[in-house]
Amino acid sequence: MSDAQPVKKSSRIQLRNRNLILEAALEVFSKHGYRGATLDQIAEASGLSKPNILYYFTGKKNIHVTLLNQLMDTWLAPLRAMNPEGEPLEELLKYVHEKLEMAREFPRESRLFANEILQGAPRMRPHLEGALRPLVDEKAGLIQDWMQMGKLAETDPRHLIFSIWATTQHYADFEAQVQVLMGEKPVYDEARKHLDRMFRRLLTP
Amino acid sequence: MSDAQPVKKSSRIQLRNRNLILEAALEVFSKHGYRGATLDQIAEASGLSKPNILYYFTGKKNIHVTLLNQLMDTWLAPLRAMNPEGEPLEELLKYVHEKLEMAREFPRESRLFANEILQGAPRMRPHLEGALRPLVDEKAGLIQDWMQMGKLAETDPRHLIFSIWATTQHYADFEAQVQVLMGEKPVYDEARKHLDRMFRRLLTP
Amino acid sequence: MSDAQPVKKSSRIQLRNRNLILEAALEVFSKHGYRGATLDQIAEASGLSKPNILYYFTGKKNIHVTLLNQLMDTWLAPLRAMNPEGEPLEELLKYVHEKLEMAREFPRESRLFANEILQGAPRMRPHLEGALRPLVDEKAGLIQDWMQMGKLAETDPRHLIFSIWATTQHYADFEAQVQVLMGEKPVYDEARKHLDRMFRRLLTP
Amino acid sequence: MSDAQPVKKSSRIQLRNRNLILEAALEVFSKHGYRGATLDQIAEASGLSKPNILYYFTGKKNIHVTLLNQLMDTWLAPLRAMNPEGEPLEELLKYVHEKLEMAREFPRESRLFANEILQGAPRMRPHLEGALRPLVDEKAGLIQDWMQMGKLAETDPRHLIFSIWATTQHYADFEAQVQVLMGEKPVYDEARKHLDRMFRRLLTP
DNA sequence: AATGAATGAGAGTTCATTCAT
DNA sequence: TATGAATGAACTCTCATTCAT
């Protein structure tokens, strides 16, 4: 009943404003990249004044890493969810679908990451090594096992993962190009079918 | 007759310097993005003075656009080379290989394009519409034809092209991540095998 | 009757907080100078919030002035204590000792004054003219009298006072330099002997 | 004859502007301290634009340390000049006079140093340890020798040096106070007589 | 064809102070 | 009395671009 109060009680305003800022920063950083984004733009987009933003975050860098860290978990969730007990092919195709769904729902997050990696991951490398690598190692092992058991056709598991990432995130990261080539019409349904077919054929033993 | 010489000589210098600048700019833009790059860095990398750079180009933007335009041709060459007279499956797999080879040989160019698209193609959209779209339309048509003739398994040709782009360029654009996950060991041989297998399975009728 | 209590109580708190602030401000101003000091540092050092500090003082300037004024009296006390009835040489040497003792006990106060004078006494000039000058005039007169009576060797009384101030405060104001040249070992005993000898020799008729 | 040209040939303009800046910076830093000084003030005082100042120096800090370093030599020259072969008492009194003369001629330089030491010598400590300490050690040894030979009355040589520094620099560093107490009339002649008398009495065996 | 010198516009950040409660 | 929240003004520094030669 008398639950221990959280040590740092953030007021409602604090929470609201931090979120306003992060939302605005996601918009701006994903559109212009880290260097291309300015605090003025984030201030404008969040409806707060520039110094007020620096009341909540210690600087531009701090906002950026906060965003990246905060997104990391969400981003890896689908891979984490790959179930060793599940039916291998279905697990992998589910992963493809979920990854594509994330590209559709969170294109800005995808572009934020893409930007960071493209510049050599100056701020994220520790996280890549600390969180991503172990997870990928684990799941690559799982896929490898499935392949050796004959449940999946054989191919390099890590390159398989790269292909899944690349093809799904492409619709978010290269959206501008996709739009030029496909027009405004929604593209994700066709994409889903195509990718399902591709990975199903690749992986069916 | 000694009149022509200075002109020629200077034009040789001009050519050399323009190329020095473009090479330096490619290095810098691809590493830091458009906004992250500075003329000082380009001056430093090219060995020319900053005002001298602006003697050859009207501004930072101009260098960037020139680079992008100049690369467009090279970039599309493999797709252009897809031969309607060739054996369909082999033509497509050759395209995959050549695209992968380009990622290996010209990762900076790949990242330069990726950066531009990622930001919404502010400077390249005209070229995408003017040069890329017709070419893709043409080749998508060709692939479609092959599929209808039963030479290739059916899938959406444009999404197929996206998948080829995405998977091959991934090794250049997300190199930082690939390195974290694969170590320093060369990765392109395995990638080639994996992608060949994937697209062969997908497209074999 | 319970009416008076809150007032009293609050006034006790007021007093306590004003002192907390002044103590913190002395620490911070003497270490960083007026411009180098920030309200944040004073807030931190005093344990009060920044707006609360501005509840007790009308601004940064006001804190500074209050400190200077408040210290003025203490600072001049030894000179005031110079007794016309006393034995001249002993009175002067006592003044030297007390001044040196103040440098040892109140180095922050000494540096606070030094900073202010160094910048041209922008805030203290009125007090220098109103309080310091009459006092110095009086005591210089006294010393002059002593000299004319043959009780002290002759020298310019004001320059004598300057020499006493300079040599004693030096150990507080230039402490950083003294430490570099003398190491960490205590320095005031030697200083006392040296200064006693110097002024005794100067003033012995 | 064919003297080797200096490696970095600074153009006449460069030299002139660097000196303009340093002169202006001396004025501003000595008056307001490091933190109190602004680039705007230095720009104003030098007649150059703010970015132009940063074309010659890498930043505010750089200007400050350049000033301090450049002054160090001048500042120590009189002490360096103390001649082991000279007549001890005359050497020391000459040092007092020269030091006083420097306070008269270079009061801004004196205040610049005083400011720096007062704040704990954050930027100069290395120089104090590297250049000042050895010199003081050497000269203190020399004075000690003179005293043991009976050429000078005994007192602690380092504290003697402190007294000389303190009393002479006082006229520059505390000028504002001296002016309040002495009026506008020139003060250095009296000071010279007083200090000569004081140190002569102290040191005469 | 080339460059040292200079700058206006703007970037991120700090800080004394005020607002609202 | 006290404080989270907010801000205008100012600060240091950067950078694409221009000037003068």
Image: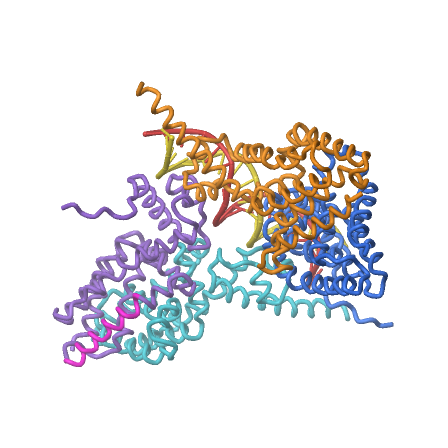
Chain colours: A blue, B orange, C cyan, D purple, E yellow, F red
In the picture provided, is A200 more to the left or to the right than B16?
right
D138 is within the stretch colored magenta? yes
**Residue under the image location 37 percent in, 49 percent down:** D25
**Which quarter of the rendered picture does the C terminus of chain C lie within?**
bottom left
- Residue F12, how many percent across, how many down? 48, 50
Of A47 and C81, nearer the camera is: A47
- Residue D23, how many percent across, how many down? 33, 47
In the picture provided, is C35 more to the left or to the right than E20?
left
Magenta-drawn stretch, dominant element (helix, strand or loop):
helix
**Residue under the image location 28 percent in, 40 percent down:** D12
**Residue under the image location 28 percent in, 57 percent down:** D103
In the picture provided, is C186 more to the left or to the right than C17?
left
Of A97 and C15, nearer the camera is: A97
**Residue under the image location 36 percent in, 71 percent down:** C180
The answer to which quarter of the image holds residue B84 is top right
Image: magenta residue range: D131-149
- Residue A34, how many percent across, how many down? 61, 47
Q: How many marks?
A: 0
D9 is within the stretch colored magenta? no
